[in-house]
Amino acid sequence: MSNELARTASGVDADRDRDPDARVRDAGTDPDPDSDAVLELDGVGKSFGRESVIEEMDLSVRDGELLTLLGPSGCGKTTTLRLIAGLDRPDAGEIRLRGAPVAGPDASFVPPEERGVGVVFQEFALFPHLTAAENVAFGLQGVDEAERDRRVRELLELVGLPDKGEATPDELSGGQQQRVALARALAPKPQLLLLDEPFSNLDVDLRVEMREEVRRIIKEAGVTAVSVTHDQEEAMSISDRVAVLNGGRIDQVDPPERMFQHPESRFVAGFLGHASFLAGRVDGDRVETGLGAIPRERVHGLAPEYDDTDVDVLVRPDDVQARRAVADGRGESATGPGRGRADSEAGDGTVVYRRYLGPSVLYRVELDSGDTVACMHNHADEVGLEERVRVELTADHDLAWFPRGAKRVADGGREDASPPR
């Protein structure tokens, strides 16, 4: 998002006076799923020339929640944020804040500075010639001086910078600058806070630290927020709910845990992390796969109408374990003897890829059945490339599944050729 929003970063014009399923966190309570929506997008569409960027988007953000728009570059998430902020006008549909239309075919367009929306920019957009306190006070013109000073002190305390009020931006670290930007956006008590890739300019260690800190601040301030990112870990770690965008459409909106364990499309399954798919055949009370039979009760929501059909079962790298195969068919783990399934063959797959990740190692195993699965091992485990292994399904949760697809993706997965179950 460009600096053209800098003058409305606090939700005012500087030239004018003036779910049970959501996660419980230490920083605050979950939003009530039955509470009034702060933000609603109803059939919103946006095109630039002949290119359609947003298509018939429906989205509701609950009072008090932090929702993240997640997706790859070009999926439309930043355009969606601009539409909400009032930087762009939708070509179709309606946008409502607290039930009041702010953009749409039958509504007068409400400009950004009149929407009561705060913005935290990717580059923070602090004014270099102002102190931290003056930056925070920027959106409080027209407010009594004593009240303005009280509000600034309150916010600097909230963001953990009570002693940095007189510091200029160049005297602050990246994390401190971000906190000042957040305090500035919160100063006029906006009804909605927008965060545009808020952690992308921070180094890796600081990024992780600031995620939970920003969430804490937002929850303590009691503000409803919408964040935009392409970083899956960021979205999963800070959000009450995540909306995954794919080609200008929302594929799924859910709490992070539910979305990760039960994705509603193959795109979501693969985008949230390494996704492998086992080709299976539903046979009575089990699903036959290249790793053996999986009890039907372990496959989430497998309806009777899928009896005697082909399906793909989703497994994550931590759902499976590769054990060295030995000549007599007994599996041996990389760290010692294991209880691999024994038969007359030495293994059921071959290691074709290995990536060292520090605390863990990611292996990719090509199964004799033709499927490919990813396995995550401890960094001390040693399994060589081209080594024969026996792969064991170790998941202790229900597994997601999809009707049989056609296109290969991720770690042996298949893209949607038909709707998810």
Image: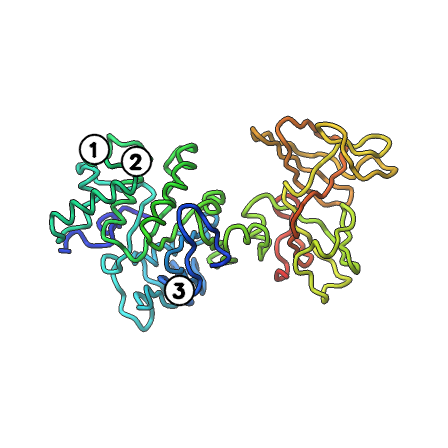
Q: Mark 2 near mark 1, Cβ–Cβ under 8 Å?
A: yes
Badge nearest the viewer, 3 or 2: 3
- Viewer-side residue, 26 vs 235: 26
Image position of 266 with respect to 237: above or below? below
Badge nearest the viewer, 1 or 3: 3
The span from disc 2 to disc 1 (Cα, nearest Å) is 10 Å
Residue 16 appears at what percent x and percent y? 14, 55
Badge 1 marks a residue whose secondary structure is: loop
Residue type at numbered disc 3: Ser
The mark nearer the N terminus, 1 or 3, is 3
The mark nearer the N terminus, 2 or 1, is 1
Residue 3 appears at what percent x and percent y? 27, 46
Q: Residue at x 39, y 68 (%)?
A: 93
Q: Which mark is residue 167?
A: 1
Neighbor class of circle 3 (other Cα within 10 Å; few <14, some 14-19, many 20+) is few
366 on left or right of 113: right
Tell me the residue that label 3 is attached to.
35
